[in-house]
Amino acid sequence: MIRNDCSEIVKKEFDFGWKAGRSGHVANLLALEHQKGDILDVGCGTCQLYNFLIQREWTGQYTGIDGQRYEDYPYPPGIKLLVNDATKVTFPKTDTVVLYWVLEHVKDPCALLSKSIESCQENVLLCVPKRNEALWELGVVEYHQLDKTHQHCGFAKEEVSTIVRSSGGKIQSYKELTEKTATLGVSLWNSEMAKRVVFFLSRIFSSKIFYENIWCEVIKE
Ligand SMILES: C[S@@+](CC[C@H](N)C(=O)[O-])C[C@H]1O[C@@H](n2cnc3c(N)ncnc32)[C@H](O)[C@@H]1O
């Protein structure tokens, strides 16, 4: 029998780990440090940011917006979650808007950032995957490139600056997060001894450093 439709055979859905594994991310710590009161978390996923904040006695009002609710994942009790397309819905006024790993999902990141800047009283905190083309030349491609739901292959520093400027904002604070060095992939070595040697050598000789993410605090220009 010849099958014409192979759509059911090849795996299309992948779990990239962020739905359950991001609460300890340094970007959440930066959100705690830089938030100015109430938070609107746009593209909130499973609201792990809220979990992180309340565990640290944060007492502001949290509202999450996401295009979908993930039924197989637990959400914090009593969460205020709006299931809607963030590019279409009107944002409630808030002190801080969080845009963590969502700008790469929308066609027009300037429009979403501009809307976020308009609806915040204080600041916007954003985090996006960084595009490291210099890594590609060495045969290493960042894993976020595999996510077919992304509209963009990550962002360069200059692109983030231009997006912020074009959206009517100004970068107040800029950081690159999550270092990658020559030890990337060391767990592929079968021998424990080989791994130790690689780590030892990396301590003696400096290596090129790459970063996975760009984080910014943005205020109105
Ligand atoms: C990579 S996840 C990031 C989740 C969360 N911010 C975090 O840090 O773990 C991106 C989320 O943005 C949501 N998203 C993408 N485009 C959206 C849109 N136009 N409106 C609302 N949510 C959107 C997706 O459904 C997904 O849950």
Image (spheres, rainbow, N blue to C red):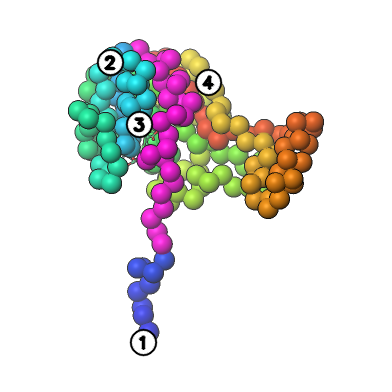
Image coords of residue 31 (percent x, y): 41, 20
| Residue hosting label 2 | 60
Figure check: 122 above or below 216: above
Look at discs 4 and 3 and give the one toward the viewer: 3
Find residue 107 and report its image quarter: top left
Instruction: Tell me if 149 is positioned left or right of 68 in this view.
Output: right
Q: Hey, what amino acid is under mark 3?
A: Gln
| Residue hosting label 3 | 48
Crowd tier of the residue under label 3, counting other residues whose Cα lies within 10 Å: few below 14, some 14–19, many 20 or above: many
Say if mark 1 contacts mark 4, CB within 8 Å. Answer: no
Report, in whole angstroms, how far the alpha carbon at label 1 lies from the one at label 4: 58 Å
Look at discs 4 and 2 and give the one toward the viewer: 2
Whether label 3 lies within 8 Å of ligand 1 gets the answer yes
Image coords of residue 55 (percent x, y): 34, 21
SS under mark 1: loop
Residue 90 inside the magenta-drawn segment: no
- Is residue 76 visible in the rendered structure shown here? yes
Report, in whole angstroms, how far the alpha carbon at label 4 lies from the one at label 3: 22 Å
Residue at horizontal 35 percent and vertical 74 percent from the top: 5
| Residue hosting label 1 | 1
